[in-house]
Image: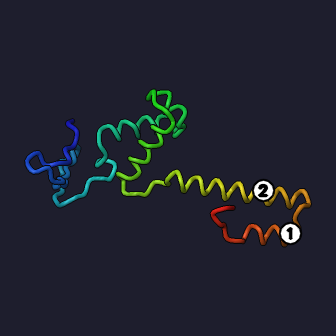
């Protein structure tokens, strides 16, 4: 079976599926059907996703199989996420989340060590973050 063509060879417009056929019972259904978002990925993006899934999302294994670095794997994954219409977490967002988790762990460690009372720890966890903290 040939791979599905998603772009018009004449004008490069998006094609839609207009007919579905069942080879077992010969029924045909006609209409306008949108292809799944995954089919809109480029060949290179689909190849990357296949490697990613085969390796169960373990980036170290994806790096090894593709012979690329961690930042390259992340960039390709972010590219696929964006192509599917989702927003990828930026490095800044991830860094802010890491900082927040680190701050939380620090407050909880101080509470455990008796350096903070429960009320002080709760206040520290609930206070708004500043750029300096």
> Looking at the image, which residue sits at the far front?
132
Q: Tell me how far mark 1 sits from mark 2, CA to CA.
A: 14 Å
User: Mark 2: few, some, or many residues within 10 Å (few <14, many ≥20)?
Assistant: few
Q: Position of residue 47 (x, y in %)?
A: 36, 36
Q: Would residue 130 appear left or right of 32 to someone viewing this image?
A: right
Q: Is residue 11 above or below residue 42?
A: below
In the rendered image, which residue does mark 2 sit on? 106
The residue drawn where x is 22% and y is 39% is: 3
Query: Residue 128 or 52: which is nearer the viewer?
Result: 128
The residue drawn where x is 17% and y is 61% is: 31
Q: Position of residue 81 (x, y in %)?
A: 41, 51
Work out whether mark 1 precedes mark 2 in sequence or the reverse, and give the earlier one. 2
Q: Secondary structure at mark 1?
A: helix
Q: Would residue 17 appear left or right of 42 to someone viewing this image?
A: left
The residue drawn where x is 79% and y is 70% is: 122
Report the quarter where the C terminus lies: bottom right
Residue 50 sits in quarter: top left
Q: Nearer the viewer, mark 1 or mark 2?
A: 2
Residue 130 sits in quarter: bottom right
Query: Residue 16 or 111: which is nearer the viewer?
Result: 111
Name the colour scheme.
Answer: rainbow
The residue drawn where x is 84% and y is 72% is: 119
> Looking at the image, which residue sits at the far left?
10
Q: Is residue 106 above or below residue 75?
A: below
Q: Secondary structure at mark 2?
A: helix
Q: Position of residue 57 (x, y in %)?
A: 51, 40
Q: Would residue 55 appear left or right of 130 to someone viewing this image?
A: left
Query: Residue 118 — which label?
Result: 1
Report the quarter where the N terminus lies: top left
> Looking at the image, which residue sits at the far right?
114
Query: Residue 113 or 33: which is nearer the viewer?
Result: 113
């Amino acid at each position: 079976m040939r791979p599905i063509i998603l772009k018009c060879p004449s004008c490069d417009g998006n094609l839609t599926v207009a007919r579905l056929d069942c080879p077992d019972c010969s029924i045909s259904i006609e209409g306008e059907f949108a292809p799944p978002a995954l089919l809109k990925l480029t060949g290179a993006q689909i190849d990357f996703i296949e490697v990613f899934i085969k390796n169960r999302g373990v980036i170290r294994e994806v790096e090894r199989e593709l012979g690329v670095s961690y930042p390259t794997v992340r960039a390709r994954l972010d590219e696929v996420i964006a192509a599917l219409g989702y927003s990828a977490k930026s490095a800044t967002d991830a860094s802010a989340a890491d900082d927040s988790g680190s701050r939380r762990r620090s407050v909880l460690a101080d509470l455990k060590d008796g350096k903070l009372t429960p009320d002080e720890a709760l206040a520290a966890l609930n206070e708004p973050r500043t750029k300096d903290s």
